[in-house]
């Protein structure tokens, strides 16, 4: 029997540690250790696992297994390719579950399956040249969903749907606004926002998709009562562009600019924050407010809060999901909340699903809440019809 190594490697684990902080990552690592143990046991059920999966440091998990070379029902090359492809899809789903759809979908990782004793670098190179082999990254998922031309047509022909999810005051649970969320064509895998925006990133069409989503959401926002805020997701590349500034500063949007919250959807290194500062100041002068999405409990985002001075900072789903399950995480969150409040921003707890989370968030003096516990996203047309 020939021995092989199976490796899961997150490309930039230190960034996750900076974003979420040591306490949250320690909890996440425990969950991932168990999750990947169960996943690989099922994935390798036809083969012999020599050593269980282990992780010497966060971001890398490895195990050894053996494949019977004499089994006539096993095509080794086909098996290795299948293990890599299936592994990528399953791990992608698990990362989204652990870190939330927004952050989890953006985590770059690889799955490497190689014969023990062979050079991994050589196998990686061969895999990239052949397009399918023993080392695959998370982008393989999007190749199967849609072609680039089909994706462009989805944007051009406006096959997108706008959904609204309410934002509520934590004290009285009254709706103060809505986050506009985009879905792809109904009855397709691109209906999922994670798949839709993942495919956009793969084809280099993120800015086009974001702008189309914002334009459609604003059409609905114009029909909202001006007592409600409307949160729109935007990446830094589109935010800093001249075409977005020209678009948002059109006369037709002036009546609703004071209700708009632009939610920056990417964790920003300091150098990128400096690049955005001038444009953000221009947009603030129009009356637009800003929110930072997916804040963890690390220093990485606190520096961004200091510089950009957003109106709202959203605690990421990963943190909110653990706030009622770990005293250490809870204390870390409360300390982070206090620091952010001192910087003048409101805190929003995102991804709330349980009453215990609501209690913990209120105890930590969170200002705003959002999540399935209160209301799932629904088509904008439905919500406007009710209002």
Image: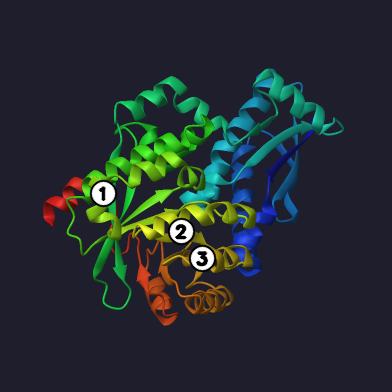
Residue marked by disc 3: 319
Q: Of tags 3 and 1, which is closer to the observer?
A: 1
Residue marked by disc 1: 253
Q: Distance from label 2 to label 1 (Cα)?
A: 18 Å
The single residue placed furthest to the right in the displayed view is 117
Q: Residue 10 at x, y = what percent?
A: 67, 46
Residue marked by disc 2: 281
Q: Nearer the viewer, residue 72 or 311?
A: 311
Disc 2 is placed on an element classified as helix
Q: Distance from label 3 to label 1 (Cα)?
A: 35 Å
Pointers 3 and 1 in contact (CB under 8 A)?
no
Q: Is residue 59 left or right of residue 235?
A: right
Residue 30 in view: no
Which quadrant is the N terminus positioned in?
A: top right
Q: Is residue 135 above or below residue 320?
A: above
- Residue at screen point 40% across, 60% down: 284
Q: Residue 296 at x, y = what percent?
A: 55, 64
- Residue at screen point 53% across, 74% down: 333
Q: Distance from label 3 to label 2 (Cα)?
A: 30 Å
Q: Residue 97 at x, y = what percent?
A: 49, 52
Q: Nearer the viewer, residue 173 or 153?
A: 153
Q: Residue 212 at x, y = what percent?
A: 35, 37
Label 3 vs 2, first from the N-terminus: 2
Pointers 2 and 1 in contact (CB under 8 A)?
no
Pointers 3 and 2 in contact (CB under 8 A)?
no
Determine the image quadrant of residue 133. top right
- Residue at screen point 75% across, 22% down: 126
Residue 287 in view: yes
Q: Nearer the viewer, residue 213 or 371?
A: 213
Disc 1 is placed on an element classified as helix
Label 2 vs 1, first from the N-terminus: 1
């Amino acid at each position: 029997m020939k021995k092989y190594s199976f490796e899961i490697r997150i490309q930039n684990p230190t960034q996750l540690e900076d974003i979420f902080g040591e306490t949250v990552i320690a909890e996440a690592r425990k969950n991932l250790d168990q999750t990947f143990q169960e996943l690989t046991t099922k994935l390798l059920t036809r083969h012999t696992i020599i050593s269980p999966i282990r992780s010497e440091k966060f971001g890398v998990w490895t195990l050894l297994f053996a494949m019977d070379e004499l089994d006539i029902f096993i095509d080794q090359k086909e098996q290795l390719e299948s293990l890599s492809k299936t592994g990528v899809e399953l791990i992608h789903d698990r990362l989204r579950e652990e870190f939330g759809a927004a952050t989890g979908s953006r985590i770059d990782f690889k799955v490497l399956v190689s014969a023990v004793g062979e050079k991994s670098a050589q196998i990686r190179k061969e895999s990239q040249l052949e397009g399918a082999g023993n080392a695959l990254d998370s982008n393989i998922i999007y190749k199967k969903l849609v072609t680039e031309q089909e994706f462009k047509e989805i944007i051009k022909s406006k096959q997108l749907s706008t959904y609204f999810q309410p934002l509520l005051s934590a004290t009285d649970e009254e709706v103060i606004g809505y986050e506009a969320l985009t879905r792809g064509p109904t009855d397709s895998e691109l209906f999922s926002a994670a798949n839709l925006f993942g495919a956009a990133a793969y084809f280099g069409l993120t800015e086009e998709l974001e702008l189309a989503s914002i334009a459609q959401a604003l059409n609905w926002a114009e029909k909202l009562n001006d007592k409600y805020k409307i949160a729109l997701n935007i990446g830094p590349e589109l935010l800093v562009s001249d075409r977005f500034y020209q678009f948002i500063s059109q006369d037709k949007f002036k009546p609703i600019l004071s209700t708009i919250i632009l939610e920056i959807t990417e964790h920003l290194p300091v150098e990128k924050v400096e690049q955005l500062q001038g444009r953000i100041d221009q947009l603030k002068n129009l009356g637009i407010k800003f929110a930072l999405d997916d804040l963890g409990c690390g220093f990485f985002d606190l520096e961004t809060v200091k510089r950009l001075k957003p109106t709202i900072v959203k605690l990421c789903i990963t943190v909110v999901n653990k706030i009622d399950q770990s005293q250490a995480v809870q204390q870390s969150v409360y300390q982070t909340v206090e620091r952010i409040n001192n910087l003048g921003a409101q805190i929003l707890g995102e991804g709330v699903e349980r009453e215990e989370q609501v209690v913990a968030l209120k105890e930590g003096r969170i200002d705003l809440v959002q999540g399935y516990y209160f209301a799932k996203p629904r088509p904008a047309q439905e919500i406007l019809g009710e209002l």
